[in-house]
Amino acid sequence: MKMKINEIMNNMKVDAIYVTSIINIRFLTKFSGSEAKLICLKNKMILLVDSRYYTQAKKQCHECDVQLIEPKNLFTKIAELIKEYYIKNLGIEEDNMVVQDYFILNNFMNNNSINTKLLPLSLNKIRMIKSDEEIATIKKACHITDKAYEHIYKFIKPGISEKEVVNEMYRYCLDFGVDGLAFNIIVASGVRSSMPHGVATDKLIEENDFVTIDFGIIYQGYCSDYTRTFSIGNNPPKKLVEIYHIVQEAQKLAIKNIKPGAKCNEIDKIARDYIEKFGYQDYFKHGLGHSFGLEIHEAPYLNPTDETVLQPGMIITIEPGIYLPNIGGVRIENDILVTENGYENLTNLSTDLLKINN
Ligand SMILES: [Mn+2]
C-alpha cells in the first residue's frame, strides 16, 4: 500500500504529499474520522488531527505519527514540517484541495519566505487494486446487498411508495451492522424508470410497473452498488420486456470478457456494440461501469475513453441500461472482481426477469 504512494512521489519528483482527501487519508492510515490532514513522506506519515479525533487517531493509526493541532494553526504546522523534513517539493491533491486553501497555503509560504514548490498531482489511482482485506470487506457488503434484494422482492407490491422501498431495504440492512447507504437510492417505477438516476419519490408502485432499484450500502467503510429492474405483476409493457433481454445479454457478454489485460474501454465497447445492433445506442449514454471501494465511484471507469488495463484485485460494476423516454427503462448492475484467471461475480442475484406477485 505504502509502495504505491512512494511510486507517485518518485514519478512526480516530490519529497512529500499534503493529503487532503479524507478518503485517501482513510485508505493510507485507517483513520475513519471525518476530518484530518496528512503529510506523507517517503518513510513516514504524519497525521494532523484536532482534539475531537486525537484519541481515535492514536488508536486507529499505528503506522502514523499522530499530532494534535488547533485548526487555526494548520498552516503554521505545515510550515514547521516543511522545515523539519527539508521538503523542497510538496505534492498537493489537484482533484481534492479546495482552491481557497491552496491560496491560503501559497500566501502563507510566500509571507514566511518558504520556497517550497506546490506541485499538483492525483492520488486517485492508489486505490485501484484492492487488498485481500478490502476484497473480503466488499464481499461482505455485497452479501448484505444480496440479502436486501431478496428481502425486498418479498416485500414490494402495488400501493407501496418508492420511498417506502428504500426505507424497508435500509432498515433490513441495519441489522447487519452497516454504516449507512452508499448513495441516494434510486427507485424508479413505471415511466420514471426511464430516468437513469430517478431517486425514490412518494410515487406509489402500480401493477405492471417496471421498477429499477439501484441500491448500495457502506459496510466497514466500503461500498456495494447493485441495480435490478423487475416487473410488478405478469403483464409489463412488451417494449420493456424486449429491452430487458437486450440489456441482460449486453451485461453477460461484457462480464464474460473481463480478465486481466482487457482494457476498460474494450469491455465498454462490447456491451455498447451489442446494444447498437438493436438500434438502442442513443438510449444508453452513460458509461458501462466504474470501480468502487471507500467511495462509490472510483478509478478506473468503464467508458469509451478510459484505456486502463484491468488487473487482478480491481473491483468494477457492469451496468448497461436502455432508457426510453415516456415509456420506461432497464438497467442491470453487478459487482465484479477481476481475478488472476478472469473474474468473480460478487453479485449472487439472478439477472433473469423477475415478475413479482405479492
Ligand atoms: Mn453503479
Image (cartoon, grey):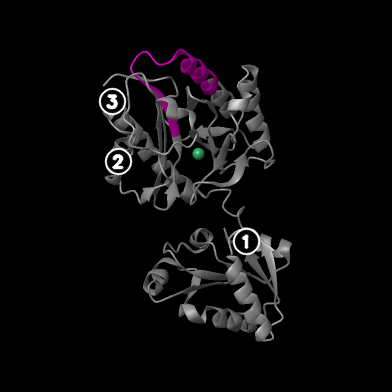
Tag 3–tag 1 contact (CB < 8 Å): no
Which quarter of the figure is the C terminus placed in?
A: top left
Residue 29 to residue 238: above or below: below
- In the picture, measured across the screen, residue 156 lies left or right of residue 339, that is left
Distance Cα–Cα, label 2 vs label 3: 15 Å
The first of marks 2 and 1 along the sequence is: 1
Label 3 SS: loop
Q: Is residue 243 magenta?
A: yes
In the depicted structure, whether residue 11 falls above or below residue 209: below
Residue at the disc numbered 2: 167
Circle number at residue 170: none
Amino acid carrying mark 2 in the image: Asn
Residue tagged 3: 157
Density class for disc 3 (Cα within 10 Å; few <14, some 14-19, many ≥20) is some
Q: What residue span does the magenta drawing correspond to?
A: 227-248
Please give the name of the residue rendered at 52% of the width and 19% of the height, measured from the top-left corner.
243
Disc 2 + disc 1, Cβ < 8 Å:
no
Residue 126: image x %, image y %? 60, 55
At x 37%, y 34%, the residue is: 146
